Amino acid sequence: KAGVTQTPRYLIKTRGQQVTLSCSPISGHRSVSWYQQTPGQGLQFLFEYFSETQRNKGNFPGRFSGRQFSNSRSEMNVSTLELGDSALYLCASSLAGTGGDTGELFFGEGSRLTVL
Amino acid sequence: AQSVTQLDSQVPVFEEAPVELRCNYSSSVSVYLFWYVQYPNQGLQLLLKYLSGSTLVESINGFEAEFNKSQTSFHLRKPSVHISDTAEYFCAVRAPGRRALTFGSGTRLQVQP
């Protein structure tokens, strides 16, 4: 079956602009998580959505937001972009619901954002 | 809160030699432990995981890791590496009931012919 699909794969923006990234989870997966990967900070958790509700949130400013749709697809948005937002943004989906604690996370290939 | 320390940022090794990638963690609660691998320009792939039970876990491609609770470690080992194992390896932990993974800083394994 198809894996986690992230679009776009690459994009370039300038400071002050905003960006929206999209993630389509594996069919049947209801949990979607987002991570930011940078050379300096490594992999950091942004937030996780399940059944259109944000369940967990990492330590990022309010410029970072997300949402999940009824078909489990998710988007994340970054407003007022800063140079430091340049990163690989990874989406991961999971089959596990509130009781499924052994759910493996399946990662997409990421969206590489460059802020100039 | 949890934290993960990967002691080596880079590990060069010759093909067919054994390798160990070290991972230590800190947590006030019991955690699940994972190793992920990332090839260039790709996302993360789960290599193996420890949830409970036997402390030695194995992957299908020859890697194994052993959970050591007293030393709070989860080192990754392979007895004989291949060129194709060249990649970045991340150790991660997750508290039961939570979805967020806490990652280490990664170890770049460079297998030389």
Image: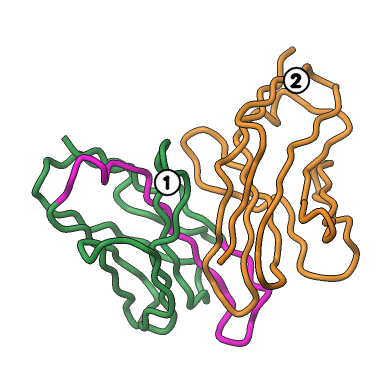
Residue type pointed to by label 2? Val
In the picture, one chain is green; tell me its letter: A
Quarter in which the C terminus of chain A is drawn: top left
Q: Is residue A85 left or right of residue B96?
A: left
Q: Is residue A84 magenta?
A: yes
| Rendered location of residue B111, percent (x, y) | 71, 21
- Range drawn in magenta: A81-105
The residue at 12%/54% (across/down) is A80
Does the residue at mark 2 contact the one at mark 1 (Cβ under 8 Å)? no
Residue displayed at 45% across by 69% down: A32
Identify whether B35 is placed above or below B107.
Answer: below
Q: Name the image quarter holding the N terminus of chain A.
A: bottom right
Q: Is residue A18 left or right of residue B93?
A: left
Residue B61 coordinates in the image, percent (x, y): 80, 42
Q: Which mark is residue A37?
A: 1
State the image quarter where residue A91 is shown.
Answer: bottom left
Look at label 1 and name its amino acid.
Gln
In this image, A80 relative to B95: left or right? left
Per the image, the residue denoted by label 2 is: B13
Q: Which chain is orange?
A: B
